[in-house]
Image: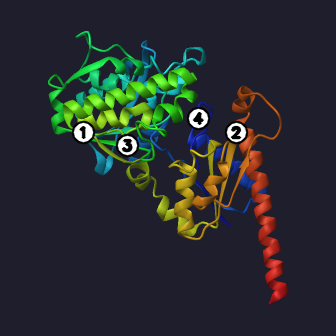
Amino acid sequence: MNVLIAPSGYKESLDAGEVAAAIAKGVERACPTAQVVCLPLVDGGEGTSQAMARVTGGSMHPAEVTGPIGAPIQSSFAMLGGKDEGTAVVELAAAAGLKMVPRDRRDPTRTTTRGVGELMLAALERGARRIVVGCGDSGVNDGGAGLAQALGARLVGKDGSDLPPGGLALAQLEHIDLRGLDPRLADVEIDVACNMENVLTGPGGVARVFGPQKGASPVDVERLSDALDHFASVIERELGLDVRLMPGGGASGGAGAGLHALLGARLRSRFDVLLPYFRLEEHLPRADLVITAEGGIDFKTARGKIPAEVGDRAKAHGVPVIVLAGTIGERAEDVLEHGVDAYFSTVSCPETLEEAMGNAADELALAAENVMKTFLAGAAAAGRIAEANA
């Protein structure tokens, strides 16, 4: 029995490696003879830079930058090794992540991506010739304005002054001045690893889809949506680009659109950018079962998250896929249209969110053990039926 464990992390609880290890523990309890391969995956969010440094033999580099609420924080970026030497990986979550915003201060009308631009500057100082910006797990909604300002762009308000931090300030944008951008950017390729399903504006715009989980009230969601609409209008008027419905433009609170319009970055599917480094396609044909995981599954999972991507790729090889998740949300069943055969919650009894996060590793192991026992029982029953019908 060859079991491939290819999960994402549990946001604000366990990283992808810890999730994989917990699942492997449960699988091995149920089937000690199983050949288990752990392949923790990243999607541009938390843990991306460290994972990329690890798989390429690269290195991590610390930097003090501006955090999402404006206070200095300790962050880091990766410089990749091997044939990718000269490539930096800047993880947006490492400077503007939701986990960096205290729960009582989560307000995407005010949080900023400025620290992401400062990480990019630090990467330039290290001699980066290519920068991969990983989008995901953000606590911001400023359209990438803060990071562009850190790199020398001027976003001028109607009163003639530079815009203050936060997504709501974009409603006052009057003029974009890119003449002060760091000149080194002209010789650097910037790839944004993002979810191409996310768009900047409209009914499915980023403020409406992700604003509430970042702390936006219903009123704030509409104000942020209007501010991003205005931001897109100014970009079109002054730069000749329409970013409203650009695939990936809504990534990380609209940072995708800002990176493309203001810095000339290329928006790419995060899985096209990142998964080749982890060699998922090499492992799938040898697997008898794939177990993937995510902190919570709902309708957004089917819109370009790791369990759906793993399911789609495994389906091409005829390999069954099971998803383990802490919570089962609205329209979680959508994931069944992406090669997933079944999904299960790992929460075994009523508990608070804090308790569930603290117990996540043990509950993952128990759920994996039960799933594996069920899978083996099904395989035994199928064998008996086949033998009886022979």
Give the side of residue 299 with respect to residue 229, left or right. Answer: right
Question: Secondary structure beneath disc 1?
Answer: loop
Q: Amino acid at mark 4?
A: Lys
- Which residue occupies the foreground of this view, 172 or 253? 172
- Identify the residue position indicated by label 2 in the image: 361
Residue found 37% across the figure and 39% down from its top: 249
Looking at the image, residue 382 lies above or below residue 340: below
Q: CA distance from mark 2 to mark 3?
A: 39 Å
Asked whether disc 3 touches disc 4, contact meaning CB atoms under 8 Å apart, the reply is no
Q: CA distance from mark 2 to mark 4?
A: 13 Å
Looking at the image, residue 283 lies above or below residue 231: below
Question: Secondary structure beneath disc 3?
Answer: loop
**Can you tell which mark lies on residue 241?**
1
Q: Nearer the viewer, mark 3 or mark 4?
A: 3
- Residue 372 pos. (x, y %): 75, 58
- Identify the residue position indicated by label 3 in the image: 245
Q: Residues within 10 Å of mark 2 (few under 14, many from 20)?
A: many
Q: Nearer the viewer, mark 1 or mark 4?
A: 1
Q: In terms of sequence position, does the residue under pointer 2 or pointer 3 come before the other?
A: 3
Q: In terms of sequence position, does the residue under pointer 1 or pointer 4 come before the other?
A: 4
- Identify the residue position indicated by label 4 in the image: 11
Q: Amino acid at mark 2?
A: Ala
- Residue 105 pos. (x, y %): 55, 15
Q: Amino acid at mark 3?
A: Leu
Question: Secondary structure beneath disc 2?
Answer: helix
